[in-house]
Amino acid sequence: MNDPRFQFDLAHAYPVGLRCPNGSTLAMEQSACRIVRGDLDYVASQSILRSCFELRWDDWEQKIREVLDAARTESLPMVSLYARARGIGEAELLTSLAHVANDYPDVAALFHFFSVEGMARALDVYRGRPLINYISGERWALDRTLPMLRQHPVPVVVQPIDDAGIPATATARIEVAMRVADMIEPIGITRSDIYVDGLTPPIGTLPFPLEISIETIAAAKEAGFSTILWPANAGLGCPTGVMAAGAYAALAVQAGLDLAVVASSDQFLNGVIANTNLILKRKTKP
């Protein structure tokens, strides 16, 4: 890497850990990976999404409240609020989501946006401390989102993509994340409030193997970032997709994953993450 502030060596990323036969170490002193409930996200089944996208806002609101109620019951820290309702534009939709989320101050909201103006309006309304997705390293996207972030310096999900596309290596992806950090840290968004998305292509479908995603998580943690994944994506379209997603999630937790967006119906993946935390003796941050 050309940036002298950051040098990443996966084999020596963690000074304390479980020694492996190849001399590397497994991260043992990381905090637990927390589940973000993602029932209304694209990790849900495609049939659910197709039917729900035809719903009007009143029906969406009922579903969203059910998910928020469930997250509160499960003591989960956050819900991923993703909705596209019939007869309502994104700006109005995001504001409506923020109003609903305000009724659940003990459950944080992960908002997804395409309209910067709509997201800014929602942040004016929302009374909690949200996480917003997505910010990328593409120059045109940063130019559009920086004014909003100056007004609302909230935690963000950074997808390590630049004007040239998706970098092929973890090192190059972290370089993108660091360029974004250079622009948003001065406005009050700390390194730990920048959640690097490891990017999760379905196994075997893109030229970037899932190994690069795991390395991206480890490299991001080494650089002081927080991390997030949608692990179910790893198994989409694969005959053994459930097992692939489970193995991928376990490796990501070991590498230092902070947030995993998972549907409540995915009992297997929820169990994998919980048990990986248990085996590695990971504890939730106070």
Image (spheres, rainbow, N blue to C red):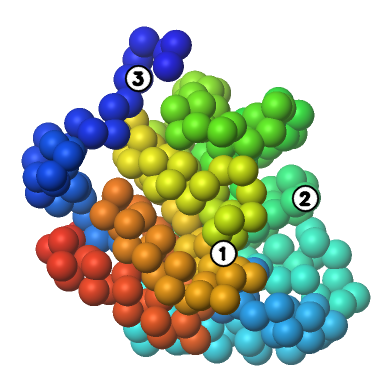
Label 1 element class? helix
Q: Is residue 63 above or below residue 247?
A: below
65 or 18: which is nearer to us?
18
Task: Tell me the residue at 29%/27% (across/down).
Answer: 9
Residue 191 visible (yes or no): yes
Mark 3 falls on what kind of element? loop
Mark 2, residue position: 115
Q: Which residue, given by chain and number where applicable, does mark 3 sit on?
A: 6
Amino acid carrying mark 3 in the image: Phe
Foreground mark, 1 or 2, reads 1
- The amino acid type of the residue labelled 2 equals Ser
The disc, 1 or 3, on the residue closer to the chain's N-terminal end is 3
Instruction: Say which residue appears at 50% left-offset and 32% top-offset.
Output: 169
Q: Where's the C terminus, which quadrant?
A: bottom left
Q: Which residue is mark 1?
A: 233
Side of 278 where 172 appears, left or right: right
Comes first in the chain, label 1 or label 2: 2
Q: Position of residue 141 (x, y in %)?
A: 72, 34
